[in-house]
Amino acid sequence: MHLAKLIIPACVLALIVAGCADVESAGGIGFSPKPGDLLFRDSDCGPLCDAIEKVTEGFKGANLSHVGIVAKDVNGQMIVLEAGSKGVVATGLQTFLSHGIDPNSQPKVMVGRLKRPYRRLIPAAIREAIALKGKPYDKSFAIDNDAYYCSELIYEIFRRANGGRPVFKLEPMTFKDPETGETLAVWQEYFGKLGIEVPEGEPGINPGGISRSPVLTIVYISESVSKKAR
């Protein structure tokens, strides 16, 4: 299914990752991310994560429901800057990876790295993410309301780092089942509790869409994610 559209909230989880530490000892993914790398996760957050994955498409069809950016904290430790249910936060790498684990206790993660022409934006993007720490989570998935969901955070920090010009692309969101064309019940319930209409067709962005961006190279896919991407 080709639905580079939705934006939903499996982004309710973590924030800033950094450095070049040995990831084997920090979560077991067998890969050492660099500052600025984007970590895409197949999260286990229940019906909402499942709904996100159903209406969005990741790189080679992978199921992806969350994304954060790698960085280093003041002590040089690996962290992930992310937007989740607690708002924009900095999360330790191992903690970030632990929120999406396969039956073999391995993290379900994909790593995207900006292509060379865009890497100059990484330091400024990380500074922007740090400056946004403490901002609230964007429950309504609206752009420009000073609240952020996971992929919106990535979109915004790179837009700011690039002088206001978007690096990643907004697309119309969809909350409809691709098989039936009907809005998924989980989304009707979710937005109903917020007292707002389902924002079908409004501009947004999602982890799957970012993972397929032409400005990224996918440099690592865990075995559990690669099986879904075949």
Image: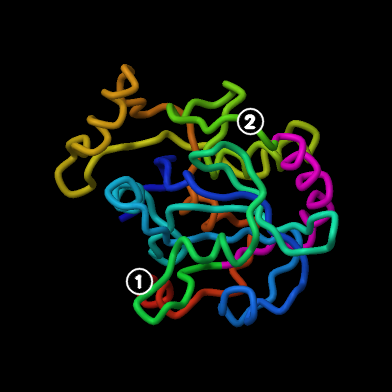
Residue position for label 1? 228
* Residue drawn at (83%, 50%) of the image: 123
Image coordinates of residue 117 in percent, x first then y, are 79, 57
In the image, taking residue 148 as reference, residue 185 lies left or right, namely: left
Q: Amino acid at mark 1?
A: Lys
For residue 209, above or below residue 37: above
Query: Disc 2, disc 1: CB below 8 Å?
Result: no
Q: What secondary structure is found at the residue carrying circle 2?
A: loop
Residue position for label 2? 135
**Range of the magenta residues?**
111-132
Name the one closer to the observer, 183 or 29.
29
In the image, taking residue 156 as reference, residue 173 lies left or right, namely: left
Q: Earlier in the sequence, mark 2 or mark 1?
A: 2
Residue 22 falls inside the magenta stretch: no
Image coordinates of residue 77 in percent, x first then y, are 77, 64
Name the one closer to the observer, 201 or 144.
144
Disc 2 from disc 1: Cα separation? 33 Å
Q: Amino acid at mark 2?
A: Lys
Quadrant placement of the C terminus: bottom left
* Residue drawn at (63%, 44%) of the image: 154
* Residue drawn at (21%, 35%) of the image: 183
Image coordinates of residue 80 in percent, x first then y, are 66, 55
Q: What secondary structure is found at the residue carrying circle 1?
A: helix
Q: What type of secondary structure mainly makes up the magenta span?
A: helix
Name the one closer to the observer, 142 or 177.
142
Q: Residues within 10 Å of mark 1 (few under 14, many from 20)?
A: few
Quadrant placement of the N terminus: bottom left
In the image, taking residue 67 as reference, residue 26 lies left or right, namely: right
* Residue drawn at (43%, 53%) of the image: 65
